[in-house]
Amino acid sequence: WYTKKEQGIRTGIWFSFNGFAQIFGGLVAYGIARGTSLHGSAIAPWKIVFLFTGLLTVCVGIIFLFLMPDNQLNARWLSKEDRILAVERVRINQQGIGNKHFKAYQLKEAFMDPLTWAFCFYACCADIPNGGITNFFSQLIVSFGYTPEQSLLYGAPGGVVEIVTLIGCGFLGDRFGNRILISCSGLLIAILGMLLIVALPLSNNGGRLGGYYLTQASATPFVALLSLISTNVAGYTKKTTVAALYLISYCVGNIIGPQTFRPQDMPRYKPAEITIIVCWVACLVDLVLIWCYCRYQNRKKAAIREDPGYTKLDNQEWLDLTDRENP
């Protein structure tokens, strides 16, 4: 639907609704906790939260199933002429449209591409902290000296940080044509936040809570790489394979993360906090390597295009070619 230059900010806006969900979910969870403590309930409060958010998700999913088209050609609200224009405007992406045939050589190329595994390493390494913080943020805030009910409410502002940083980095990344390095700023902010949590004394509740809010900026590189898979990885089979491996790595990281928060480490959870910092520093190194590799590939492809013997195929923009096949 969008050109390469438009996808960074749009991916950021889409993912920023995690932040909106954190705000909304925190307020809903706090309201349910207060209501059940005052009036009681037939089922556990956490079950009410899961039922409410789960049913809401199912309803939205059903709406999307019937209203959202899978591509421009099936958009019912566009005229025939507008559908053609919508397709034509993404010609510049040179990734075709609507070709969903499985190609074994593209699967092999996806597994042989070092960029695939750099993406996967980032997703796994970055989501070890995410899995820990997401699942234990309430206990983390309680360890700052607040009550469990307050932790639900005080976690909500972290969503604002996520919204601002994701949209801001997405916009600046597209504006300056450098999504990877600009997204690193969010990770640096998150590292600063975790250093505050580790270094400040237990008595400094406000400072440590502020540090937690800063950690919510950590999602910016994850989203930047997600948009990079969309724009820089070409070929239907290759793109879907890389995206699947990226999300599998994301899930693995989220499984590992909660294991770092052990009951015996309360109230500081220092081993978990150190693990988070180490993972984020490793992610920064990985991002720099990805940036260097992409720059190298750009120079290599530019040299191919400038070669007198290079010939562009007819309607090459619509062919299901991988990023290695199409310089």
Image: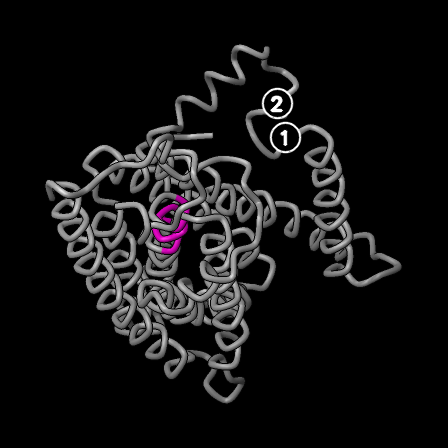
Question: Is any part of residue 144 visible from this angle?
Answer: no
Residue drawn at (45%, 43%) of the image: 320
Amino acid at the residue labelled 2: Ala
Q: Nearer the viewer, residue 168 or 111?
A: 111
Q: Position of residue 141 (x, y in %)?
A: 47, 64
**Mark seen at residue 69:** 1
Which residue carries the number 2 mark? 75
Task: Give the number of the disc on residue 87.
Answer: none
In percent of width and height, residue 285 lies at 22, 68
Picture quarter containing residue 216?
Answer: bottom left
Give the image location of residue 290, x and y in percent: 24, 61
- The reply to whether the magenta stretch includes residue 226 is yes
Image marks 1 and 2: residues in contact by CB distance under 8 Å: yes
On screen, residue 119 versus residue 150, left or right, reads left
Picture layout, residue 283 above or below residue 84: below
Residue beneath the point at 53% across and 44% down: 23
